[in-house]
Every structure is written in structure tokens, then in C-alpha cells.
Amino acid sequence: MRIFAVDERDSTWERDDARFRVYVFDGPGHAVTAFDIVDATVEEALEAAAAMSDGNTKLWALALVETDARALPGLIWLSGMDYNDPPGSPREWQRRRQMQDRYLLATRERHVTPTLPNGLRVIRVFPEWVSGWPLWESFTDEYRRTGPELGLSVELSDALYRWNETWLSRAVDDPVPARWESDGLALVARLRTELDGIAEVRPEFLTAPGPEERTR
């Protein structure tokens, strides 16, 4: 997120007739149902999305419906994104995380095992300023996971541990070591292979969220 000052007089038009679109994804195959909302504020649209998803017990996303210079309709994502589109950037991973976390929180509140609709767990990968594995599972009693606990091969488990230790070997304000991020992506690819059919792996070190952004 970036915040910067602007001149409030630089806008040339304004409207108050926003059209919102809610996508609700149902079941392990993420079947889509879409609804348009008009005559509503964004707060009302968000409340409606939560209600349409049965209290966040289904994955959902909210978009603003707009037209481009060719008068063709399109979407500006406000919360989440099309869950059936594989994330291709740190921002899209962050939007997928937003959808998954509210769904998993709802499962936890209902005392249901926190897994995605397709039965997969979510394993998050990011480093921390403490020795150990950079593996985390939100909304569970353990939260921080270890390589052996997840049943990883010794080679991959040790590599993940060393990757986190490399992060720890620098001062807080030092840049990350050369190739550290690309090495992390390679480890994520191996982790996905070993956890295939067990968990979805989120590479959260790409967005580098601060501690206040992380959800236990």
C-alpha cells in the first residue's frame, strides 16, 4: 500500500451511481454466481457480499463495474478477485489471501477444520526474525509449522530452514541477499509438489507484509 498527498481540485467529474458486482464461489469446483448491486454505498455492498456468501462461508469478491473509453464494460476489483484466475503478481496473491482468510476465519468460528472448499489447507511462506521454518498455517492452534511436521523430505525441510536463516543473518535495514527471493520461489515450487493434494502454498514473502498485516 502507498499513500501520498494530492491536490483535491485535480478531478474533473464525479458520480454517485456506482454499480457493484459480487462474485460468490461455491463448492470445491468454485462455481460462480454473480450479482449486481446498485443504489448502494460501498459499505452496503460489502455487507451484502458477506450476506450473499452466507456469512463468509463461501469465497466471494467485490468489484466496481465500469466502462472504458470504448464503452466496453469491465471490472475494478475492490475486494478479492476472480478466484478461478491463478494469481500472477504479488497484488493478486494478496487479493486471493484476502478471500481465503475471511473464509478460513468463518470456518474457525464455526469450529470446523480450517480448510478451503476443496479440502486443502493453506500453508503460508514468509521469513521471520526467529530461527526455524518459514511455514505458517493461520486459524489453527499451532500457527507456525515445521518441515518434519508437514512430512516434507529432509532435503526440502533443511533448505527451507536455511532460507529463513539467511534472512536472519542480515541486519534489519540491510537489503535481502542476492537471489534470496528467486531461491524462495524455487523452494515454493518444490513445496507445492510435496504438498500436492494436501495444501495450497502462498508465497507471502513477495508482498513482504508487516507484522500488523498478518493474521493469526
Image (cartoon, rainbow, N blue to C red):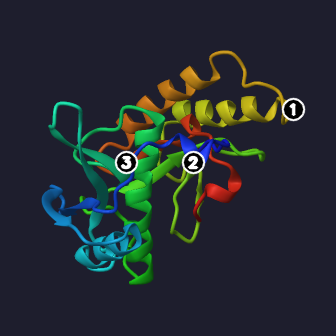
* Disc 2 from disc 3: Cα separation: 12 Å
- Can residue 119 be spotted in the picture? no
When asked about the image quadrant of residue 33, the answer is: bottom left
Tally of marks? 3
Are the residues flagged by discs 1 and 2 in contact, CB closer than 8 Å? no
The three-letter code of the residue at mark 3 reads Glu
| Disc on the earlier residue, 1 or 3 | 1
Q: Looking at the image, which residue is at 26% across and 61% down? A: 20
Rendered location of residue 158, percent (x, y): 61, 33
Crowdedness near tag 3: few (<14), some (14–19) or many (≥20) residues, C-alpha within 10 Å: some
Rendered location of residue 74, percent (x, y): 21, 42
Question: In the displayed structure, does residue 129 sit left or right of residue 198?
Answer: right
> Could you tell me which secondary element the residue under label 2 belongs to?
strand
The three-letter code of the residue at mark 1 reads Ala
**What mark, if any, has residue 171 been given in the picture?**
1
The three-letter code of the residue at mark 2 reads Leu
Rendered location of residue 93, percent (x, y): 43, 42
Question: In the displayed structure, does residue 205 sit left or right of residue 39?
Answer: right
Q: Looking at the image, which residue is at 76% across and 44% down? A: 131
| Disc on the earlier residue, 1 or 2 | 2
> Could you tell me which secondary element the residue under label 3 belongs to?
strand
Tell me the quarter of the image containing the C terminus: bottom right
Crowdedness near tag 1: few (<14), some (14–19) or many (≥20) residues, C-alpha within 10 Å: few
Tell me the quarter of the image containing the N terminus: top right
Q: Look at the picture and state if 101 lies above or below 49.
A: above
Q: Which residue is label 3 attached to?
A: 200
Q: Which residue is label 2 attached to?
A: 135
* Disc 1 from disc 2: Cα separation: 21 Å
